[in-house]
Image (tube, grey):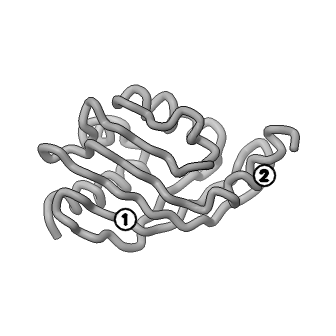
Amino acid sequence: MGQNSKTVEAFYAALGRGDIPFIIGSLDPQIVWKEGENFVYADKSPYIGVDAVLSGLFARLAGEWDGFAAVPQEIVDGGETVVALGRYGGVFKATGVKIDAQFVHVFKFKAGKIAHFQQYTDTAQFKDAVRLRAGA
């Protein structure tokens, strides 16, 4: 396993324990973070820069979900591009709806830092979970 794959593995572990300093340290300051098209948090995508990722995405996830987790099941080492396949879990607080959704995350590195992130996931499952938030 190459260093970038190890960084991705450590990134997920840091997410799981809420280690914000580690997360910040693994991201390029000008990271371009893209959520999947039609995802409930794609409204501000792409998130550009560490502050945008933390306040625009991670803070919303932490505030709106109980036990939100992204758990990789496989990490594919492509050198400067690393792909993680896994599952999201958690309960949307406003509706009490639990999710168990597959994801694919594509990480691209620059100088040992995550410089680009692209998410793909089951957007319909997330929309169903948050539906009551919008009053639908």
Instruction: Please report whichever mark, 1 or 2, sits nearer to the chain's N-terminal start.
Output: 1
Q: Which residue is mark 2?
A: 96
Q: Residues within 10 Å of mark 2 (few under 14, many from 20)?
A: some
Can you tell which mark lies on residue 84?
1
- Name the foreground residue: 124 vs 129: 124
Q: Residues within 10 Å of mark 1 (few under 14, many from 20)?
A: many
Name above or below for residue 101 compared with residue 33: below
Point 21% across, 49% down: residue: 109
The percent coordinates of residue 113 (x first, y second) are: 20, 44
The percent coordinates of residue 42 (x first, y second) are: 56, 41
The percent coordinates of residue 107 (x first, y second) are: 31, 54
| Total residue callouts | 2
Q: Quadrant of residue 44?
A: top right
Q: Which type of secondary structure does the marked residue at label 1 adopt?
A: strand
Point 12% across, 44% down: residue: 111
**Residue flagged by tag 2: what amino acid is it?**
Gly
Report the mark closest to the observer, 1 or 2.
1
The percent coordinates of residue 57 (x first, y second) are: 51, 36
**Residue flagged by tag 1: what amino acid is it?**
Ala
Q: Which type of secondary structure does the marked residue at label 2 adopt?
A: loop
Name above or below for residue 31 compared with residue 90: above
Point 83% across, 44% down: residue: 132
Q: Is residue 121 left or right of residue 117?
A: right
Q: Is residue 74 left or right of residue 35?
A: left
Q: CA distance from mark 1 to mark 2?
A: 28 Å
